[in-house]
Amino acid sequence: MDLNALIAVMIILPIASALFLNLLHKKDRTIKIIAIITAVVLPIIPLLTPYGSHFFGGYLPLAQNSTLAQGLPAIITGTQLSQFHLGIMYVFSSAQQLMIFILGIITFFAIFTFINETKKPSGVYAFLLFMGTASLSAILLSDDIFNLFVFFEIAALAQVGIVVASGIKDNYETALKYILIGNIAGPLLLLGIVMLLGVTGNVNVTDMIFSIKNGFVDPQSPVLLMALSLITFGWLYASGLPPFHTIKSEVYSKALPHGAALIQAFSVFTLVAIGIIIIRLFSYNPFTHIAIIGISVIAMILGITMALMQTDYKRILGYLAVGELGYIGIGLGLGTALGITAGLFQAINESVITSFLFIGFGTVLYKTRTSDTKKLGGMMYVNPKVALLVLLAGLAMAGVPPLNAFQSKLMLIQASIQSGLPEIGIIMILLSIVTFMTFMKAFYTVYMRPKPKELEVLDNKIPKSTIISLVAFLIICITLGLFPQIATSSLQTLAAGLV
Amino acid sequence: MREVQKKAEEDQPITNITASAMLAAELTLIASVLVAVIMVRLIHPVLMIIMIAAVLIIAVMARPIMPRLRKEQNDDLNNMMFYIVVALGIVVALFYWGNLNV
């Protein structure tokens, strides 16, 4: 068996499962079994798959494919054209392995929580969760920028679907707004890709880089610069960086906790995937790094200060998640091996911690049906164990040792100092303190202050699966905090290749 | 209806928590922007000094900034669209025009 075929299975399996689940109605047991089996298998596949490439349709470059090259004129086989990739190519290395594994873990716990918190699990909702995961896996793997765009659109639709399915007040309006905004940003991203295709004659990122680096394309071509600006704009939309931070945080707040956990993971990994492509293609242009750093600093400041002003804890988490995206962007923007490794490590950590927080705080919604901190209080007495877990998640997000974000934030500060930009390190420390303060404000109002008389706490018991999910996230946080090299060793190769 | 609802929310009494959060956000914003402006030293130290002075003056003149920022960063689609179009203009101008002409 060709084990590299498992690269494609990482996308095909969740899509197949999603399509099948979509067909099941009122077959709760079958939905549960299929969803759990798929969710268990998802994180296992990347661990079994050997590193390498997968060529869809078997279309290797002509230089490696003598059968296909036979009989073709020398103008094709004897020139650079023979090195170009003919079909869609997926690349799987240690960094993709780690990211898809973490995405699989988050999907598993989102599905696990969803199935146990919902009396009648919907096949359509599971379809949306799996389609989103499949799309993100493809975005992380694809070396073909048009293929990436297609999956990016599917992921955006899956996110809209998750919001529509939540049943939370005003969710339809948020979903519609996200679609309308996507109708501006999505086509502009596509236009950028089309411009790249027009200039380089290719949609394969490796081939495009070859064309730019070897003088086949003028790096200062106005069309190329316009493509860079449009792709950067699409990247802002995809990841929820400013000016899309408001709608993205609103999307998080209008999804159910397990859905929000997954949507934020989608944002984090899209930021990483498209950010890496921007760096690979345009790192020759020093302004690219300056722009990424500038956008990231704005995201950190706006995200975290806006979080402080919110009174809905889901919105607080949404804005904090946007603020944390800025840290990842800083790492990528610094452009050094240490900076990029730290940024990627922060992406792994943030996706885990924010999922931890969304599912943890989600228990409050489960017990009270409200997320308004003005109406909440005294939840510590209702479930002290969950309160402790949520507190630890908040400490992790703020970067308190020995939890994981401490390591990645410390690496980011070191990288910024090494790059001659200690100011960024100072801003990161300042905003980490404010993140902690924002979290404690939410924690105090929800858990620690006296319970308001009018607050009604429902009798429904928090499912054990939710507690298990939270403990599992905590174990990941502690493990990566004590042994960061587990993650960094997988990410260093990719980071070194980008410098 | 929405506007009335929002107005009603605005008229709710200010608590200690909201007041301290607003103050903390204001200080964080000013401090972060001031530290970020120090990076202008890489272009020219004199420009950095001028920009720091300008930021300080704006911060004093325009305070409190956070209530205005919050008002602007709301969930209204028109507002979102406005800032998206502004951001698109800035990104395109910086990448395209900036690279070709500076």
Image: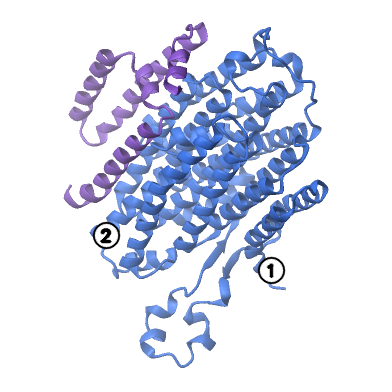
Chain colours: A blue, B purple
Classify mark 1: helix, strand or loop.
Answer: loop
- Dot in front, 2 or 1: 2
Q: Chain of mark 2?
A: A
A263 or A28, which lies in front?
A: A28
Category of crowding for the residue at label 2, using alpha-carbon neighbours closer than 10 angstroms: few (below 14), some (14–19), many (at least 20)? some
Quarter containing the N terminus of chain A: bottom right
Quick check: A222 left or right of A264? Answer: left
Q: 10 Å neighbourhood of mark 1: few (<14), some, or many (≥20)?
A: few
Residue A114 point in image, percent of width and height: 72, 39
Q: Is residue B47 visible?
A: yes
**Residue sticking out furthest to the front:** B1
Q: Which residue is mark 1?
A: A3
Query: Is residue A69 rendered to the left or right of residue A15?
Result: left
Picture coordinates of residue A403, whole percent (x, y): 63, 31
Disc number at residue A364? none
Q: Secondary structure at mark 2?
A: helix
As rendered, which of A497 and A397 lies closer to the eye?
A: A397
Query: Percent x, y for residue A368?
Result: 69, 21
Amino acid type at circle 1 is: Leu
Q: Which residue is mark 2?
A: A223
Of pointers 2 and 1, the one earlier in the residue sequence = 1
- The residue at the point 49 percent across, 58 percent down is A150
**Residue A379: percent from left, percent from top:** 70, 16
Q: Residue at x 45, y 22 (%)?
A: B1
| Up-down relation of residue A245 to residue A122 (above or below) | above
Q: Is residue A195 above or below residue A238?
A: below
- Image side of residue A72 versus residue A448, left or right: left
Residues flagged by tags 2 and 1 on a common chain: yes
Alpha-carbon distance for marks 2 and 1?
40 Å
Q: Chain of mark 1?
A: A
